[in-house]
Amino acid sequence: MNSMLINVWVASIVVLLLCSNVIPTAFSGAIIIFYCPFVIFGLYMISYIPRDMWLVFGLMCLFLYNM
């Protein structure tokens, strides 16, 4: 399997376990603290994308939604 697909699968399993209260609250806090730098870095990288590209992406999503 693709490594990106495996990462998405593992992240979705962790979120599912957190939402069903299988994983304790302290562990969920540790996960939030662990993922904060990745989220900040992602937002930092997104800020470099030009505004026109966001408009094109939005139009593409709107077109796909209406199909």
Image (cartoon, grey):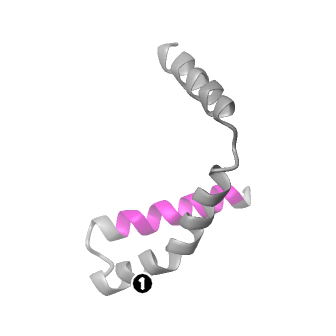
**Residue positioned most to the right:** 2
Q: How many marks?
A: 1
**Residue named by callout 1:** 30
- The answer to which of 32 and 2 lies nearer the viewer is 32
- Main secondary-structure element of the magenta-colored stretch: helix
With 11 as the anchor, is 51 left or right in this view? right
Residue in view at x 64 percent, y 34 percent = 51
Q: Please give left or right for residue 30 compared with residue 24 in the image.
A: right
Q: Quadrant of residue 10?
A: bottom right
Q: Is residue 10 above or below residue 54?
A: below
Identify the magenta region. 4-17
* Residue at image point 47% right, 60% down: 12
* Relative to 53, residue 16 above or below: below
Between residue 4 and residue 50, name the one nearer to us: 50
> What kind of residue is marked 1?
Ala
Looking at the image, the residue that sits furthest to the top is 67
Residue 13 vertical position relative to residue 31 in the rendered view, above or below: above
Residue 31 appears in which quarter of the rendering?
A: bottom left
Instruction: Give how far across and how far down residue 47 sits, in percent.
Output: 63, 50
Q: Residue at x 65, y 55 (%)?
A: 5
